[in-house]
Amino acid sequence: MKKYLIFVTLLVLIAGCVHSPQVEFLAPTGAYLGQETPGDVPEVFAPGIVSTGMFTRDIAMTPDSKEIYFCISLANYTFATILVTKEINGKWTHPEVMEHMRNPQYMNLEPCISPDGKKFFFLSNRPDPAANETEGDEDIWVMDRIGNEWSEPYNPGQPVNSEYSEFFPSVTKDGTLYFTRSEKESRVNYIFRSRMKDGKYQEPEKLPPQVNSGVTQYNAFVDPDEKYLIVPVNGRKDSFGGTDYYLVYRNPDDTWTEPVNMGNKINTVSGLEFSPYVSPDGKYFFFMSSRIPEKEKLPKELTFSLLEEMYTKPGNGNSSIYWVDSKFISEISPL
């Protein structure tokens, strides 16, 4: 009973934070939630709508960018789910937890929509009813587009999912699936790739050291044309912090260039930089970061009202989603 009450209490907190009855939601209009597009300096994406001060990470969009999905987690991932906001009749809806992601017993994160908009991939630890599971582990799940909705989730099974943890799917135009696998023996995460052939995923291959270049790595985003990967890597000597975003280009012969740090405009001393994404039109790079305001820019005196204000806004130490013009990606290309 006590555990149930904790669940209910936290869900009420989530609902209160995401959709507070005390603050009227003024539906924005225009592309990207009506936000002014950024230049070459990263800015918080949709403050007060997507980036709210809660622990926010991961973002994905339909090909027309009229549906935006993102993730919120609470209590050290005890509660983690995917939200959606949609542009309908020119106005954006208030973010809500999407269908199939509302059970507080399970973690749902890392949405990925295929370039053709027909499939929705995500991470979940729900049990697989098709395999008669009563307890799940971290697997990649899929939903199919049916009209304007998504189907019931299903587990694609082997060879993509295994006895290990698989997460952060990213898909190319030809259906090749990139993902991270955590090997239990070494407890190290590696980036894998599974080709699609005759409608079936092939045996995943661990990508070479140019991609898996650190002590561990997470959550690679693949360009839809498979020209490059953006890989969050931990433990490299040229890192600005615990985990940094690196760019790795794929050569025509399917070899990879050496990784290039994406620079100090993107990477900071933050240890929470491990969720990259490029918008469907290729114009903007979105990324998770837990950067905080510089102390020099804060008032000289801390007050309760100041602490309360910081707590309810992005930049308070919880991760938020940032975006920046993506032109710099081609500018730092080693090719």
Image: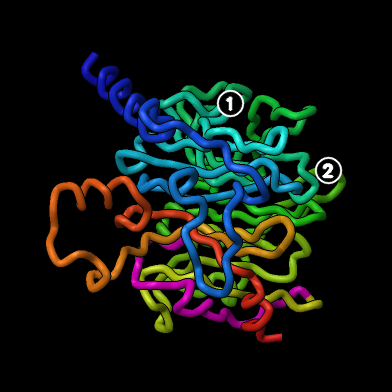
Q: Nearer the viewer, residue 155 or 270?
A: 270
The relative height of residue 169 versus residue 130 in the rendered view (above or below) is below
**Disc 1 packing (10 Å; few <14; some 14–19; many ≥20):** some
The relative height of residue 178 versus residue 258 in the rendered view (above or below) is above
**What kind of secondary structure does the magenta stretch mostly adopt?**
loop
Residue at the right extreme, as displayed: 198
Residue 117: x and y in percent read 76, 43
Residue 217: x and y in percent read 48, 64
Any magenta on residue 261? Answer: yes
Residue at 21% across / 18% down in the picture?
A: 2
Residue tagged by mark 2?
A: 199
Magenta residue span: 254-274
- Residue 92 appears in the picture as rendered: yes
Residue 289: x and y in percent read 42, 61
- Discs 1/2, front: 1
Residue at 54% across / 70% down in the picture?
A: 212
Residue 263: x and y in percent read 49, 79
Residue at 65% across / 30% down in the picture?
A: 154
Q: Amino acid at mark 2?
A: Gly
- In the picture provided, is 15 more to the left or to the right than 50? left
**Disc 2 packing (10 Å; few <14; some 14–19; many ≥20):** few
Q: Amino acid at mark 1?
A: Glu
Q: Quadrant of the C terminus?
A: bottom right
Residue tagged by mark 1?
A: 99
Element under disc 2: loop
Which circle marks residue 286 in the picture? Answer: none
Tell me where residue 144 sits by quadrant.
Answer: top right
Tell me where residue 292 sits by quadrant.
Answer: bottom left
- Residue 162 appears in the picture as rendered: no
Label 1 vs label 2: CA separation?
Answer: 27 Å
Element under disc 1: loop
- In the picture provided, is 99 more to the left or to the right than 79? right
